[in-house]
Amino acid sequence: MLSSSHSATASSAFELKGRMLTLSVLRLLTTDVPTLAQQLDAKTAAAPEFFQNLPVLLELEAVQGQPLDLAALVASLRERGLMPVGLRGADPSQVQAGAALGLGVVQGGSEAKRAAEPKREAPPPPAGAGMVVRQPVRGGQQVYARGGDLVVLASVSPGAEILADGHIHVYGTLRGRALAGVQGDRNARIFCHNLDAELVSVAGIYRVSESIQTAERGRPVQIRLDGDALRIEPL
């Protein structure tokens, strides 16, 4: 039995915290791995740096009971820079296959899936048009203004992702991820009333939360490219 004096002076080897970090969810709608890989390539082409070493949770509820080569899927994701870390909504055989690959299991099922599913948006606007979103963008949602600017008249929650081929304007707090100029427009900018983002990107050049200075947070800013550097400037 350890004495009280020894317990007081012994240093702890670790801390276990009940903190939930933001995690991207990849919800499978097919078990066709080549098709998944092809569509992922198209998705990641807009901002390849953002997806490098990105941890993802594989949501398998929609493909339960279907033959799935999980090893091939994980290998394909890792080839593209994505890092699968666990499964959700998996059937017993998928859980067993995931365990063999070192993947954990996250409980949550349908309720968690509904909270993470992107809200169905209106069809993309025609080229050159903009998109206006009047309600808050919740965690797990993705909003893409194809061919124009995106204006959000509310806040963007942690875990949400907003993208635009042109500029992004957020008339609230930006806590999620914002990617402007995703088709390569280096003149695109991000404007927000209160910066607290997980990631900001213009034309594929990005900064993550850890590289955003304290002095740049909690204030109205614009984010633009200066050469190959991403600048965050007060408004």
Image: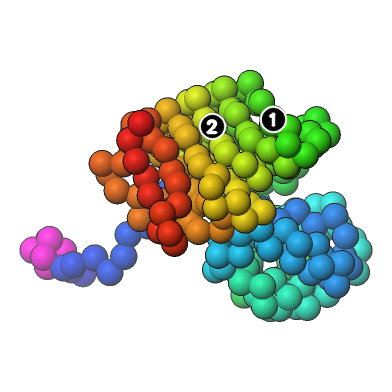
Residue 116 position by quadrant: top right
Q: Secondary structure at mark 2?
A: strand
Q: At label 2, which amino acid type do we have? A: His
Instruction: Give the x, y percent position of residue 12.
Output: 24, 65
Q: Secondary structure at mark 1?
A: strand
In this picture, is 15 found above or below 233? below
Residue 155 within the magenta-colored segment of the rendering: no
Report whether residue 120 is seen. no
Q: Residue at x 41, y 54 (%)?
A: 226
Instruction: Give the x, y percent position of residue 120.
Output: 78, 34
Furthest residue in direction right, as rendered? 66
Quadrant the C terminus occupies: top left
**Mark 2 highlights which residue?**
169
Q: Residue at x 48, y 56 (%)?
A: 206
Number of numbered labels in the structure image: 2
Q: At label 1, which amino acid type do we have? A: Met
Q: Residue at x 78, y 78 (%)?
A: 72
Quadrant the N terminus occupies: bottom left
**Mark 1 highlights which residue?**
131
Left or right of 13? Residue 31 is right
Q: Which mark is residue 71?
A: none
Q: Earlier in the sequence, mark 2 or mark 1?
A: 1
Q: Which residues are magenta?
A: 5-9
- In this rendered view, identify the residue nearer to me: 234 or 227: 227
In this picture, is 125 found above or below 109? above
Left or right of 94? Residue 188 is left
- Count residues near mark 2 (Cα–Cα under 10 Å), then give few for <14, some for 14-19, many for 20+: many
- In this rendered view, identify the residue nearer to me: 61 or 185: 185
Alpha-carbon span between mark 2 and mark 1:
10 Å
- Count residues near mark 1 (Cα–Cα under 10 Å), then give few for <14, some for 14-19, many for 20+: many
Instruction: Give the x, y percent position of residue 42.
Output: 76, 62
